[in-house]
Amino acid sequence: MRFMCYTIAFCGFLCATAALCGQLDQRQDVFMKHPFESFLQTFVPEVARKSRQLNKALWILETTGASDAADLKAELDAELRLLFNDEAIYQKLLAWERDKTLSDPILKRELNVLIRAFKQNQIPKALLEEIAQKEASLAMRYGSFRPQLDGRSVTENDIRDLLKTE
C-alpha cells in the first residue's frame, strides 16, 4: 500500500511538472533537450495510465470486496511495479544523476524521485508479483470484512447505531 501512495504522489509530482516540459518543448530552439526529458515524455504517460487503471481497480475492490477485483488489482499493481523494475532504465537514471549537463533543479528533483522509486523495486519479478498478490488479498479481506455481534453479521452503520444508544 505504501508503494501505491508513493507512486500516486510521484505521478502527481511528474504530471504537475508536465506543463513545464511542454514549455521546454516550445523553446527547444533556445535549449537543447536532455535525454532525461525525452525519457520523461514517454515514461510519465505510461505510469499515469497504469496508475489510473490501478486506482480504478482498487476502488472497485474496496467497495465490493470481489475476488475478481482483487485479481485485477494484483495484476495491475504488478504491472506498475514492473515498470519500475527495469535494471537498464535504473542504470540509465543513475548515469543521468552523475551527468553535469543536467542543471535544471526541477528535472534533478524528478530524477531523484524516479531513482528512489526504481531502487525500491530492484527485487526479483516473482517477489514483486507475490507482494502485489498479497496486498490485493489483504485489500479484499478488508473490503469484505463484516464484524460478528451476538452471532450475526453486522454492518458499520449497525455498530454506529448501537454505540449511539449505549
Image (cartoon, grey):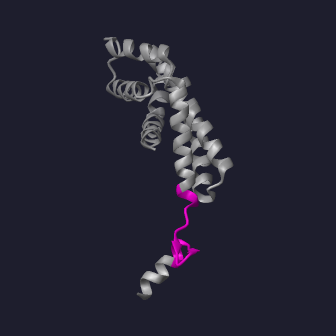
Q: Residue at x 43, y 34 (%)?
A: 17
Would residue 93 appear left or right of 46 to someone viewing this image?
left
User: Residue lying furthest front in this view?
Assistant: 151
Would residue 99 appear left or right of 91 to someone viewing this image?
left
| Segment tinted magenta in the rendering | 142-158
Residue 106 occupies quadrant: top left
Residue 75 vs 163, above or below: the answer is above
**10 magenta-colored:** no
Q: Percent x, y for residue 60?
A: 62, 53
Residue 49 occupies quadrant: top right
Q: Pick the residue in front: 37 or 128.
A: 128
Q: Pick the residue in front: 107 or 131.
A: 131
Q: Percent x, y for residue 16?
A: 45, 38
Q: Pick the residue in front: 31 or 9.
A: 9
Q: Percent x, y for residue 141?
A: 55, 54
User: Residue lying furthest bottom in this view?
Assistant: 165
Q: Is residue 29 visible?
A: no
Residue 97 vs 71, above or below: the answer is above
Would residue 121 appear left or right of 64 to someone viewing this image?
left
Quarter that holds the C terminus: bottom left
Q: Pick the residue in front: 14 or 86.
A: 86
Q: Residue at x 45, y 34 (%)?
A: 14
